[in-house]
Amino acid sequence: MSPSKENVAFSSYGRPWMIVVRGRRGMAFDRWLVKRTGFSAVSLQYALAGQNPYQPTLLMTVRGAKSGEPREVALPYVRRGESYIVVASKGGGPVNPHWVANAKANPQVWLHVGRKKISAVAHVAVGQERAELFPFVCANKPNVARYQERASTFGREIPLVVLTPEAHGKGTVK
């Protein structure tokens, strides 16, 4: 089984047949849906498969680390104060999603939360900040601890990325 199929099987709690919206076209549809409505069909199907509550989802636009081109990704989030915390779990697999490297290289990001557009700055929580955030995230997103346990078998610590809105929006996505 390929790592991608293993991640889907793991993330769907052994119910991969419930994951209908996937692949390149499915992800494009989901990004479109999140941008226009704030709702993610992908997040819903994984929540249903795992018998977990639906997680609100935002659309993050970040510039590619190498290309500089805008890249969009739909991500379930946990809110803490004014910030949004997104988890780079990639199903507890062996590598981080590409958007993490993009956000490290280009921390200026743009969010669609609901129908609201927000300019924000991204940073990966490390050290004491991560130690404080991890239990909070796990309490609000029950599958994260399970993903971290699996990622640990590959020697990976799942990044928690904090998205902090800017007081006055900086720039626009071209």
Image: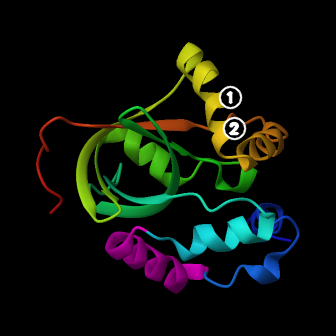
Q: Please report contact status of discs 1 and 2: CB closer than 8 Å, yes or no.
A: yes
Q: Is mark 1 on a helix, strand or loop?
A: helix
The location of residue 163, given as percent across then percent down, is 38, 39
In the visual, does 67 lie left or right of 91?
left
In the visual, does 125 lie left or right of 47?
left
For image coordinates 82% across by 61% down, the residue present is: 10
Give the camera-side residue of 93 and 61: 61
Give the camera-side residue of 46 and 88: 46
Amino acid type assigned to the residue bearing label 2 in the image? Cys
The location of residue 48, given as percent across then percent down, is 73, 70
For image coordinates 74% across by 49% down, the residue present is: 143
Please identify the quarter of the rendering in which residue 139 is found: top right
The residue singled out by tag 2 in the image is 138
Work out how far the residue at label 1 is from the one at label 2, CA to CA, in angstroms: 5 Å
The residue singled out by tag 1 in the image is 135
For image coordinates 58% across by 47% down, the residue present is: 88
Where are the magenta residues, as a range? 22-38
Residue 93 visible here? no
Amino acid type assigned to the residue bearing label 1 in the image? Pro
Residue 38 visible here? yes
Quadrant where the image shows the C terminus: bottom left
